Amino acid sequence: MTNVVKFLGEVLTPVIGRYANGQTSIQLVDQDGMPFMTASVAHDVNIADDCVIIKNYSENEGILEALIEAGIIEKPFCEIPTGFVTLYVAVMITDDIDPTGGYIHADIDPTGGYGFEFMG
């Protein structure tokens, strides 16, 4: 069963992929399969393959808590200050995210492009 993320009154499906730099990306799509938001960012730091950097400011404020509640990520173990905002590094809960279990995987362009590949 695919975990869903409840955010801003929407029920969203996580799209797990990789940015061009190899870091994990999380896109969220709505019930119609349309892109709703990007919960992650790529940054010029080294992180483990099972980690993700979360953007929890501006229009994304509150997504960190929603991802934790949905069982997508663990609580952040590291913060990255970037000027006026902070990014959060968290471990993906990989036991609940099965690459062959129906999640949608994507290669995400850090500039915002989508390359969805539907799995399952």
Image: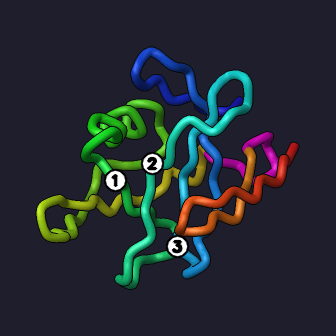
Q: Which residue is mark 3?
A: 23
Instruction: State the quadrant of the N terminus.
Output: top right
Q: Is disc 3 surrounded by few (<14), some (14 to 19) or many (20+) residues within 10 Å?
A: many
Whether residue 48 is in magenta: the answer is no
Residue shown at the point (50%, 48%) measured from the top left:
38
Q: Observer-nearest residue: 54 or 96?
A: 54
Q: Which residue is mark 1?
A: 55
Residue shown at the point (51%, 67%) measured from the top left:
50
Whether label 2 touches label 1, CB < 8 Å:
yes
| Residue 48 x %, y % | 45, 76
Secondary structure under badge 3?
Answer: loop
Give the Cα distance between marks 1 and 3: 14 Å
Give the Cα distance between marks 2 and 3: 13 Å
Relative placement, left or right, of 50 versus 91 is: right
- The mark that comes first in sequence, 2 or 3, is 3
- The mark that comes first in sequence, 1 or 3, is 3
Amino acid type at mark 3: Gln
* Looking at the image, residue 15 lies above or below residue 24: above
The mark closer to the camera, 2 or 3, is 2
Residue shown at the point (39%, 31%) measured from the top left:
69
The part of the chain drawn in magenta is: 97-103
* Looking at the image, residue 26 lies above or below residue 69: below
* Looking at the image, residue 64 lies above or below residue 105: above
Q: Quadrant of residue 80?
A: bottom left
Q: Quadrant of residue 62?
A: top left
Give the Cα distance between marks 2 and 1: 6 Å
Q: Which residue is mark 2?
A: 39
| Residue 17 x %, y % | 65, 60
Q: Is disc 1 surrounded by few (<14), some (14 to 19) or many (20+) residues within 10 Å?
A: many
